[in-house]
Amino acid sequence: MPEGKSVLKAQKLLKITLHYADDRIHALQIRGDFFMHPEEDLEKLEKKMAGSVLERGELEQRAKEFLQTTQVFGFDEKSLAEAILQASGKAPP
Amino acid sequence: MTIRFLETGAHAAAFNMGLDETLMKSVRPGEPILRFYAWKPPAVSIGYFQSLEDEVDLAECKRQGVDVVRRVTGGGAVFHDAELTYSYISREYPAGIIDSYKLICNGIVLGLAKVGIQAQFVPINDIIAGGKKISGNAQTRKRGVLLQHGTLLLQVDVDRMFSLLKVPSEKMRDKLVQNVKERVTSVNRSFEEVATALKSGFQEALGDSLRESAVSGAEKEMAEKLAKEKYASKEWNFLR
């Protein structure tokens, strides 16, 4: 299964490790120097994004739904989607 | 309202983090805790969401005798050496996260003014003086208790800091070192002078008097247990 990585400077640094197949996210790890409240929700975000098609609209929509109930300082749905697309090679670094 | 004030000295990274978690459990309603401390040996702490192996040159830390620890708070990798570190722990705090950063960081801003340094809080979590970062801060909220801890740089050794962190390439290291030297500054005062100024600053910012206190035997025991079983453990530090 292909693996991709990206590092994006949003408001804070966002680092993605992506496992994907058939244009869909199988699993991903989100790392960086951002803040998230509550902190334990990171795993929920990773699970939320898994299964998404590697398409900007769906990625942003899933991230936006997550951000309605969890506060994040350092990235938003647009920068997360961009970082994921860069990791998959669908957007230039 | 009074603030329970603790000056807990210089300790290893795992104990410092263990004591922060302990004080989150022992803080009483209506009496926040303000703690000043230092790090011995020097240490690198990483944010809760960072990967230890991605961010830190563990072999170099070992070679230089520098501790390594994961924090419970987010944010980036920090090299703790010549600095005053504070923790503010409270059961009462503004609901808004940026509002609470601003309130607590104002203690540092007012304290720095007392040693002649004009500074300002810049959201999310920085304090800037003369256009350069002089303090970084990080916050968590768990079970109705807020912990905000942060650094006030007394002196900064950027070259040593970057010798301990991983960078994409040696060329990138030189560029990063130069960039940070231009963007970071320090107080260049003694720990004692800065501590006196900051005590006054926090009193003014929070509107409360400080009650000198000490870590209890039970708190010390719990902190040491947490240090050994959690903060010094591979399971915690290699969480990501």
Image (spheres, rainbow, N blue to C red):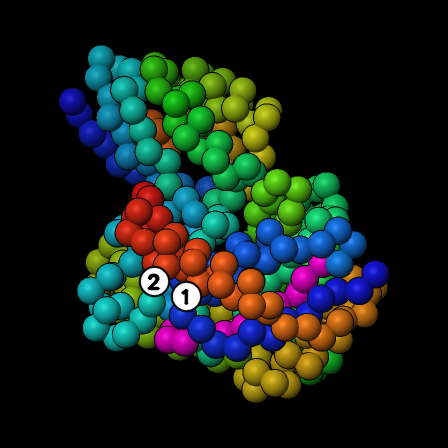
In this view, the residue in front, A71 or B223, is: B223
Residue ID at (70%, 79%): B197
Q: Amino acid at mark 1?
A: Ala
Which quadrant does the C terminus of chain B fall into? Answer: top left
Element marked by disc 1: helix
Q: Amino acid at mark 2?
A: Val
Residue A90 appears in view: no
In this view, the residue in front, B169 or B126, is: B126
Q: Chain of mark 2?
A: B
**Nearer the N terminus, badge 2 or badge 1?**
1
The dot on residue B68 is: 2
In this view, the residue in front, B12 or B22, is: B22
Q: Which residue is mark 1?
A: B13
Residue ID at (71%, 54%): B28
Residue B54 sits inside the magenta stretch:
no
Displayed quadrant of residue A48: top left
- Label 1 near label 2: C-beta < 8 Å? yes
Residue stretch in magenta: B32-42
Residue B21 appears left or right of A24: right
